[in-house]
Image: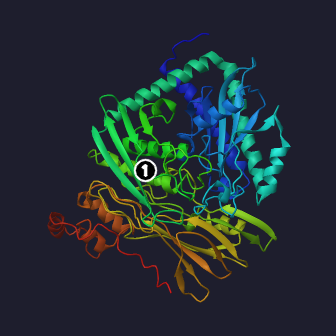
């Protein structure tokens, strides 16, 4: 085997070509997926791994899908199928064997060269509109275990041999899933995207040589590790603990689930340790994390904190040691623990706990808390469409803000949730109304709901929608109603979440945070998503930025005065003398003013 050292230009060219392969896969799936969760919201990821199961190229993937998990999934494929051949394909969604959660179906394809040697693995992971759960939702927060959850579990099950479908598996899915035609369309789109990845890698291997690609993989991962070392040397040295609490739902303690993370930074060595072992045992609910999501949620906080352009791959991950405990709610689950909601709610709380711990190491580290996720604006909706008489199931992405203030700047407003990293798209209202019997009455940002800070968190978002001509069932697991997103380094708390039903007569009632709710024709749900916490003292925010926030409608004059210490006249101009006095005094409050949710009856 020839093993030569590639120069910088060769490394740059080859990583761009491999990332281009992942983007071709992404483009294929986005353009051919059948369900709205794929072809409108883009809740999927495509990545490439080495034959040794190391993550190599991710392109535009969702962090929660790929930072950890693909490596474990590829390893289980090799364990269960030691004699891999060209033309094989495997369906994988088991959270006990490396996948994120059962609703994320993955297609794994080994790339085999002409000599029969396994060179790479391609992975396509896509969230499903329906995965066979007992209820028409892919997020069963109330599931006591995987049996109550009801999802079909595929631990790297072979679905193609010699490029031909194994129809028994296909029929099994079509009999269990409520929208079989939609699922089959998504399956074909995933398979097509994965086969394009295989085809492109085979072509590159033939062109440049497999030994050259092997040398590239080793050197690119080593380069990525060194880039991570350089960034981690800038993190403040020390040890700190952070915590973040998920609201109570059925199956949890009355006070909710408090997640704790202890972070120790070793800048001289260019590494970080994150200890998640001091957390509760797994609970009889669907919030428990898979191993993949527990590791990924911690990694997300590190990357959010350090900034820079460190490649997200197995090389950079070598410098972050995430310690997990088997049987923990935020560790390594044992079957039959339910991990139905593993990618969002409690994963975000891990990200927040690590972020706050990092912020306590010193200025310039960590972030504020991201707002909690899965409000009704992101619900799974289902029913019978009166226009066609057919069953529909789809997850909405009508909007969720939640972005946190960081040491580097203000929040990303349309972040969706910490694990998605802003990579999913916000649904078009017109398309959601076209494809489902829904009417979206309102979608707007709410002023004075941001976590105040030198760098502010995102404001809250209100979405109101309801069915047209039929009843519609919505399933959601809304967090942050009790535990709103906190600030860091003197930053303020963002607005919390809430959800109401508006009856036909216009009156409202508060809904449970974790529920399957049936809305009758003429009713609607009001979904208030969390804002995000602020980073740094609000009085350190540049007064011109505060003025612009007022002009743009983010904050009122009262909030500018009371929280940011900036006096504005009726024209929005800064009153300098009054501002100087205000900024010398303590702020009146760092919390958003209460949102007018109406008068629940």
Question: Is 142 above or below relative to 7?
Answer: below
Q: Which residue is mark 1?
A: 279
Name the one closer to the observer, 140 or 232: 140
Residue 543 lies, in percent from the top left, at 25, 61
Instruction: Residue at 46% x, 79% y: name it.
Output: 597
Residue closer to the observer: 490 or 405: 490
Q: Find numbered disc 1 in the image and state the secondary structure of the residue it sits on.
A: loop
Q: Is residue 83 above or below residue 382?
A: above
Query: Which residue is more in the foreground, 552 or 485?
Result: 485
In this view, 27 is above or below 222: below
Quarter of the image where the N terminus is located? top right
408 or 470: nearer the viewer: 470
Q: Residue at x 39, y 61 (%)?
A: 485
Residue appearing at x 53%, y 73% in the figure? 512
Task: Give the farthest residue toward the bottom.
Answer: 505
| Residue depicted at x 60% and y 30% | 53
């Amino acid at each position: 085997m020839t093993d030569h050292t590639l120069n910088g230009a060769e490394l740059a060219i080859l990583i761009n070509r491999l990332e281009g392969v992942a983007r071709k896969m992404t483009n294929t799936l986005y353009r051919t997926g059948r369900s709205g969760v794929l072809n409108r919201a883009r809740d999927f990821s495509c990545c490439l791994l080495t034959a040794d199961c190391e993550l190599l190229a991710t392109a535009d993937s969702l962090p929660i899908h790929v930072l950890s998990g693909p490596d474990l999934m590829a390893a289980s494929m090799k364990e269960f199928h030691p004699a891999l051949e060209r033309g094989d394909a495997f369906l994988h969604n088991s959270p006990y064997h490396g996948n994120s959660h059962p609703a994320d179906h993955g297609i794994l394809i080994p790339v085999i060269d002409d000599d029969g040697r396994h060179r790479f693995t391609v992975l396509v992971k896509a969230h499903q509109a329906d995965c066979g759960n007992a209820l028409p939702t892919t997020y069963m927060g109330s599931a006591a275990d995987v049996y109550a959850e009801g999802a079909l579990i595929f631990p790297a099950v072979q679905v193609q041999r010699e490029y031909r479908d194994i129809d028994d598996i296909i029929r099994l899915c079509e009999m269990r899933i409520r929208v079989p035609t939609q699922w089959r369309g998504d399956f074909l789109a995933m398979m097509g995207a994965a086969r394009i990845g295989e085809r492109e890698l085979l072509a590159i291997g033939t062109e440049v040589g497999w030994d050259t690609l092997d040398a590239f993989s080793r050197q690119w991962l080593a380069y990525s590790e060194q880039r991570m070392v350089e960034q981690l040397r800038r993190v403040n040295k020390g040890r700190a603990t952070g915590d973040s609490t998920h609201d109570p739902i059925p199956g949890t303690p009355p006070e909710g689930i408090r997640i704790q993370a202890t972070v120790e930074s070793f800048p001289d060595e260019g590494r970080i340790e994150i200890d998640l072992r001091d957390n509760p045992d797994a609970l009889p609910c669907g919030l428990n994390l898979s191993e993949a999501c527990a590791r990924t949620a911690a990694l997300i906080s590190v990357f959010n904190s350090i900034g820079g352009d460190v490649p997200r791959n197995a090389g950079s991950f070598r410098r972050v040691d995430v310690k997990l405990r088997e049987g923990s709610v935020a560790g390594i689950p044992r079957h039959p623990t339910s991990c139905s909601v593993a990618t969002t709610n409690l994963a975000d709380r891990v990200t927040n706990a690590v972020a706050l711990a990092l912020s306590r190491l010193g200025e310039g580290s960590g972030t504020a808390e991201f707002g909690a996720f899965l409000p009704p604006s992101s619900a799974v909706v289902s029913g019978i469409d009166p226009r066609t008489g057919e069953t529909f199931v789809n997850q909405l992405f009508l909007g969720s803000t939640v972005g946190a203030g960081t040491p580097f700047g203000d929040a990303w407003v349309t972040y969706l949730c910490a694990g998605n990293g802003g990579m999913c798209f916000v649904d078009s209202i017109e398309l959601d109304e076209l494809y489902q019997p829904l009417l979206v009455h309102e979608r707007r940002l709410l002023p004075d709901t941001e976590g105040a800070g030198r760098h502010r968190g995102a404001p809250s978002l209100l979405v109101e929608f309801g069915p047209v001509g039929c009843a519609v069932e919505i399933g959601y697991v809304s967090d942050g109603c009790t535990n709103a997103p906190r600030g860091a380094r003197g930053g303020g708390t963002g607005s919390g979440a809430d959800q109401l039903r508006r009856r036909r007569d216009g009156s409202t009632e508060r809904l449970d945070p974790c529920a399957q709710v049936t809305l009758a024709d003429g009713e609607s749900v009001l979904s208030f998503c969390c804002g995000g916490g602020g980073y740094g003292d609000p009085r350190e925010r540049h007064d011109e930025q505060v003025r612009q926030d007022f002009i743009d409608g983010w904050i009122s004059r009262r909030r500018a005065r009371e929280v940011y210490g900036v006096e504005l006249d009726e024209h929005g101009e800064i009153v300098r003398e009054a501002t100087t006095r205000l900024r010398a005094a303590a702020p009146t409050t760092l919390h958003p003013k209460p949102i007018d949710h109406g008068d629940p009856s």
